[in-house]
Image (cartoon, grey):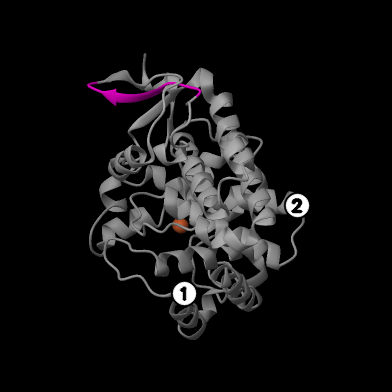
Amino acid sequence: MSTKDFFRIRLSTIRPSEDIPFAIYVYVDSKMVEYVKLGDKLAAAKIASLHGRDTGESFFVDNINKPLYRDYVKSSMNSSLISNDQKANILRESSIAILEDLFETPDVGQAIEDTKPVVKDLLEFMQNAPESVGSLISLSGHDFYTYNHSFDVSIYSLGLGSALGFDKATMEDLGLGSLFHDVGKRNVALDILCKRGPLDDAEWVQMKMHPQFGLKILNESATVSDGIKAACYEHHESWKGGGYPQDLHGQEIHPFARIVSLTDTYDAMTTQRSYNVPMRPTEALNMMKEKVSQKFDPEMLRAMYSVLFKMDAA
Ligand SMILES: [Fe+2]
Ligand SMILES: [Fe+2]
């Protein structure tokens, strides 16, 4: 048995004191070991304590049970016994576990295909429980890698897309584009991605290659839309010019990339990274408006206020 026959789950998606309809495994000494038997229960306190130690690589379910796990999560999402804030947490944790698996698969076209249900679930949740959308955003603050970041950027981007009146198909594409915007970081050395403290010149050169790396990865698949590619390739362009890699201006930049540029910066400013102190939402937005407004589409920057106001008012 190898890890390939299993997919990752987060224990916080398991309902306490209820029969679990699949076995849960842990990966020890290069082996999958059954940890919870099919039909066993876990108490809430046990789940909480194990989840606290879960680095995102601890718990697995057999691939055969993927549809079963999906139905299990779906039934939590439809349950009247679970609060919307808890549902937001389940949706976030189950989506991030899926992303972790997908970001490592070589076939990006397939990964994007497999991500479509995640985006559909997000859109459905945003529609059914708009007051709990803020709870989808990571509370832990610490960004170990790019998954939490990508997920948060997609939530903000979908909020912005909806404020701008995008239709359903465009929203689904935007959701995928924002989830995959940093996919090129797979080709950036991990010690650069996780470095504490500012990057030196040579490290920056490599880091700034991630839009190109990403486009190359996405171009390998024939089915990836232009919008998704643009969100990846153009999200470090700047409204008044001076961005990279193409130094585009204004409307030349794809709307998805203009959205991601804004939500990406916002998330970076409000999240605890290795070397900065996170800003409060209004502080970050005011800073974006006053100091770096030339980077962003002014209409979108204005719309972002209403998106955050709605999330915050929740
Ligand atoms: Fe980026
Ligand atoms: Fe990013």
Q: Say above or below: 13 vs 259.
A: above
The first of marks 2 and 1 along the sequence is 2
Residue nearer the viewer, 52 or 253: 52
**Badge number at residue 281:** 1
Residue 120 placement (x, y as % from top left): 66, 44
Say what secondary structure mark 2 lies in: helix
Q: Quadrant of the C terminus?
A: bottom right
- Residue 22 painted magenta: yes
Residue drawn at 36 percent across, 39 percent down: 47
Secondary structure category for the residue under label 1 = helix
Part of the protein shown in magenta:
21-29
Q: Amino acid at mark 2?
A: Lys
Q: Position of residue 311 (x, y in %)?
A: 57, 67
Vertical relation: 144 (above or below) 64: below
**Residue that badge 2 annotates:** 168
Mark 2 surroundings: few (<14), some (14-19) or many (≥20) residues within 10 A: few
The residue under the point 46% across, 44% down is 93
Q: Indicate the position of residue 135 as horizontal and vertical percent values.
A: 51, 58
Q: Between residues 50 and 2, which one lies in front from this camera angle?
A: 50
